[in-house]
Image (cartoon, grey):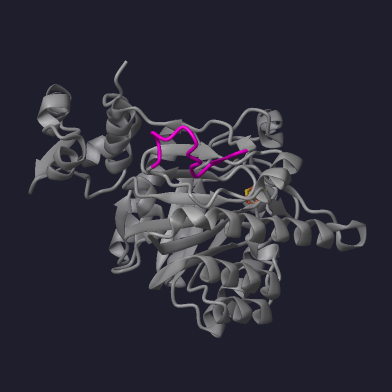
Amino acid sequence: MRDLSIYIHIPFCVRKCLYCDFLSFPVRGAETGGEEELERYQRLLLEEIKQQSIFYKEHQVVSIFLGGGTPSLMTEEQMREIMEQIRAYYRVAEEAEITVEINPGTVTEEKLRGYITCGINRISIGLQSADNEELVRIGRIHTYEQFLETYRAARGVGFTNINIDLMAALPGQSIVSYHNTLRRVVSLRPEHISAYSLILEEGTPLYEKRDRYVFPSEEEDRQMYLMTGRYLSAHGYHRYEISNYAREGYECRHNKVYWQRGDYVGFGLGASSMVEDVRWSNPAGMEEYAAYAVQARTPAASVHAETSADAVRPGENASSVCPHRERLTVREQMEEFMFLGLRMMCGVEREAFGEKFGQPIEQVYGDVINRLCTQGLLMTEHGRIRLTERGIDISNYVMAEFLFD
Ligand code: SF4
């Protein structure tokens, strides 16, 4: 039985953050049909979850992640129905990690309690900064105080596995204010912290307004990154991936599936999937997705049935084909194996590469690995290859070295 992870995309937010280029949009107010929009979407999800399940009878679900968007806009009841639908159609491991992303200010204690009773055992709260002015500048809907209320409510109802998302390199952010954010967050003792630098994406409102603000320089951004590692390590959080830190035993299992190239299927608007090296994305337009989600799949279909002319596979059915469906070439698989695996501090295992691709890693990447080791960017140890501190610092360069032309 193969392991499977499930991602569910909820593309609605209260309003769009100024830096956001994710597939998400503001949900209309209840008085103008927002509730119906969510309800309709949730029904589509239920249908898609059911229709797709025929492909995964031999899989065991080891993690579920509800991301967005703002999944916490869903009521307890809507969330319960989604979880029940998954359990009805998939084999979910007893110890599966089940995470929901939460935006401060979008949950009540009652809703959080409801989430726990439907089996959610991990939450991820988007804080980004403990400085209210920084939050306003990037268009977040909440204050630090509202985040605190949400965090305490989550602890109060019994969540024992909480992630907090942070961002560095925000407009107007200083090293001192970033340090203050780290200090405040660590004092709460969450189990997991993710800390990414803001990437100013063209086309976002923040990009258009960029001249109005002073952004941290590249050097300051680097200092914030180094400070994150040092500060969190001094307080009991180990870095297990370039931007992710956890207390002992709380690494995010769902994200590790992505970095280790495990099988995952995404449900919902624009959600991506990869099963046995076949990758596809759901339609990103709501009406196309609505048509796709309700289409019945052929029960005989199997991901293994590549050679049969009539075969219908995940991501595909008799009357519709998902956009961007592709089987990765062996070279693409090797590239991904390296640059995703090296994101993790434990690096990649030589033997695992050999087993997957039928040839020793040295035969494919020997020269690259030797050169990067000589440059002090990679190290080899106990059969594994991993980034050094210097390698982490310029990881984009290191990863690019593993790409074939
Ligand atoms: S809450 Fe997240 S998904 Fe929604 S607009 Fe903000 S950054 Fe984008």
Q: Quadrant of the image for the C terminus? A: top left
Name above or below for residue 109 compared with residue 174: below
Q: Which corner quadrant of the image does residue 401 belong to? A: top left
Q: Indicate left or right for 212 with 336 as reference.
A: right
Q: Residue at x 71, y 35 (%)?
A: 205
Q: Nearer the viewer, residue 175 or 90?
A: 90
Q: Is residue 105 above or below residue 288?
A: below
Q: Provide residue 187's location: percent of width, then percent of height.
A: 44, 71
Up-down: is 130 above or below 191? above
Which residue corresponds to the image point at 29% horizontal and 26% vertical from the top-left?
Answer: 331
Residue 134: give x, y in percent of width and height: 63, 50
Q: Residue at x 42, y 38 (%)?
A: 278
Horizontally, is 328 left or right of 347 in the view?
right
Query: Position of 306 compared to 165: left or right?
Result: left
Residue 130 in view, yes or no: no
- Horizontal side of residue 367 vs 252, given as left or right: left
Q: Nearer the viewer, residue 349 or 235?
A: 349
Q: Is residue 319 magenta?
A: no
Q: Is residue 311 magenta?
A: yes
- Residue furthest to the right in view is 31
- Magenta extent: 305-318
